[in-house]
Image (cartoon, helix red, strand yellow):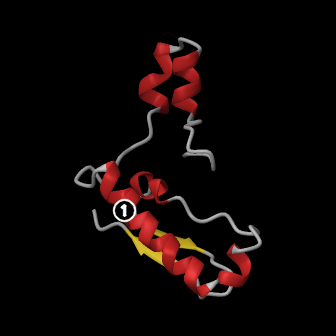
Amino acid sequence: MRTTDGKSHLPVDVARLRGHSHLYDVLEPPNYLPEWTQEDLKSIERHFHEVIEERTNWITERGNIRLPNLDVLREIKGKMYMSVPGMYGVSTRNQI
């Protein structure tokens, strides 16, 4: 998962910083979307955020909402729901 400033703070990153190489395999998150590049996912995320911002302008202008990070889709097998105030929400499903 990335923080709002774009930095990675995954448990495996902390293990790497501290030299705990015996934990790398256990902590490395799965990738259920290997055919999608990071650029593909960022492009989809950018367009997704534009739709949310367009429809919930009154919320996003005040900075009261953190837009969903789509990187999490790589780690989820099956269905996921994201609640978006002012919208019905978004449901996704990985077809694996």
- At x 76%, y 69%, the residue is 64
Q: Is residue 94 above or below residue 39?
A: below
Residue lying farthest to the front in this orientation: 61
> Residue under circle 1?
43
Residue lying farthest to the left in this orientation: 35
Q: Is residue 32 in view?
A: no
- Choose between 55 and 96: the one closer to the eye: 55
Q: Secondary structure at mark 1?
A: helix
- Choose between 76 and 90: the one closer to the eye: 90
Q: Label 1 amino acid? A: Ser
Instruction: Give how far across and how far down residue 22 sits, in percent.
Output: 47, 15
- At x 35%, y 47%, the residue is 31
Q: Is residue 92 above or below residue 58?
A: above
Q: How many neighbours does mark 1 have within 10 angstroms: few (below 14), some (14-19), or many (20 or more)?
A: few
Q: Is residue 77 in view?
A: yes
- At x 29%, y 68%, the residue is 95
Name the side, left or right, on which 16 lies relative to 65.
left
Which image quadrant: the C terminus? bottom left
Name the side, left or right, on which 54 lies relative to 96.
right
- Choose between 7 and 79: the one closer to the eye: 7
- At x 53%, y 58%, the residue is 69
Instruction: Give how far across and how far down residue 35 sits, in percent.
Output: 22, 53
Instruction: Give how far across and how far down residue 29 sits, in percent.
Output: 44, 40
Instruction: Give how far across and how far down residue 68 sits, in percent.
Output: 57, 64
Residue 61, by quadrant, is bottom right
